Image (tube, rainbow, N blue to C red):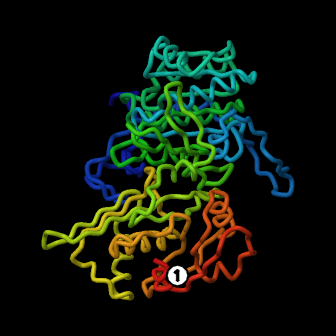
Amino acid sequence: MAKGKHTAGFFCGSCGYESPKWLGQCPICKEWNTFAEAPASRAAVSGGAKGAETGFHGKPVMLSEVTAKEEDRILTGIGELDRVLGGGIVQGSLTLVGGDPGIGKSTLLLQMCRLLALAGHKILYISGEESLKQIKMRAERIGPFNDRLSLYCETNLEMIEETIRQFAPEIVIIDSIQTMFSENIAATAGSVSQVKESTGILLRLAKGMGISVFIVGHVTKEGTVAGPRVLEHMVDTVLYFEGERHASYRILRGVKNRFGSTNEIGVFEMKENGLAEVANPSEYMLSGRPEDACGCVAACSMEGTRPLMIEVQALVCHSSFGVPRRQAAGTDLNRVNLLMAVLEKRLGLQMSGCDAYVNIAGGMKIQEPAVDLGIAMAVVSSFKNRAIDEKLVAFGEMGLSGEVRGVSMAQKRVQEAKKLGFTTCVLPKVNADALKEIEGIRIVGVSGVQDAIDMI
């Protein structure tokens, strides 16, 4: 019997489910032909001598003996990034940054490294995709650097681990995790077993040495990080960089954060010298609004603790075909169909023979139901060919009976609308009754969609 080849079973490349044998369909995510053999590392078979370096205690400790204190955070110098991280970089944290190719992940991290290096922090940037000259060319477009930032081009995890232990940086950037490989794993770089082993090594380094590690992850065509989904469970923070490659805006969204909120977003604009922060996203999203145009209304959505003003656009016209076309950009199409069905049933509007197009201007993707009222008013405005006052903002959740339900943080939404110059705010009556009086803006509480439509 041949020695040295030990298998750890099979892993689903979509969700990370483990199985002792190969399966055609994953029983968890229902994907076909995603199982791959994952050989076990020789280090794991020989006993795993590095267990003592993980930084965890070897005996149980009573809860009363544990001292909890606020984690020391390192400010990156990029306000939008600090917001999404929960106030800065936590020492010993492992952060995964995902996004489409060319979206600006490496540029954002290099800008972060520049500001941290100028602040006196010791940074090590490890690249497995670009050469030193390529990184230098991008760095020259961003701005001047000092000697606190070091570059290292390598894909062998054993050599990278040795370099990190000798160099002892405060922050490490791994670009990208799919290019890294360990000699203890008999698989190609980017495979399920290699990605898991590489992340495990970096996790031990981060927790054992107190180093903050950022790893860049490629995404699949479905928009998730390539490799096993267990990768997202191993790290402390998962950030996704969203936006169209050919558009100027970028959205940094936190989908997991053990040290802060998971609903915060950061807004950036791509310029010639890198990414620039958008300090007031609401004003940015509403720039260029048409005047006296039918089917346009301002709405307010909450992204974490930040109120975000957006423009909802709708176009309703009679269809030339037997089956009308419905299309939505920036919001859920099924939600739009549901709202149009409520308008037909409760208000008697005959839109079953009309094409309908709904768009959230600015490229934002809004899932919060608080924009229901804005979508409904925009659809009726286009259908009736009547313009809505450009100084009016509306938000609220619609039910199947046509009622307008209350939403959270109404006070912040109204204050954001007033700051941007809106004079009328249409919101659920239950929120209007609980609001404190705000000078300079008229509060209109509606209990049903009919009350809101009467204002058009």
- The local secondary structure at tag 1 comes to strand
Classify 13 as above or below 179: below
Q: Can residue 45 be seen here?
A: no
Q: Quadrant of residue 173?
A: top right
Which picture quadrant has residue 291? bottom left
Q: Label 1 amino acid? A: Val
Q: Position of residue 446 (x, y in %)?
A: 56, 83
- 325 left or right of 387? left
Indicate whether 76 appears above or below 148: below
Is 148 on the left-hand or right-hand side of 285?
A: right
Q: Position of residue 341 (x, y in %)?
A: 33, 80
Q: Which residue is mark 1?
A: 404
In the image, 39 versus 352, the foreground residue is 352
Q: Does 437 sit above or below residue 29?
A: below
* Spot occupied by residue 184 in the image (x, y as percentages of width and height): 46, 26
Q: Quadrant of the C terminus?
A: bottom left
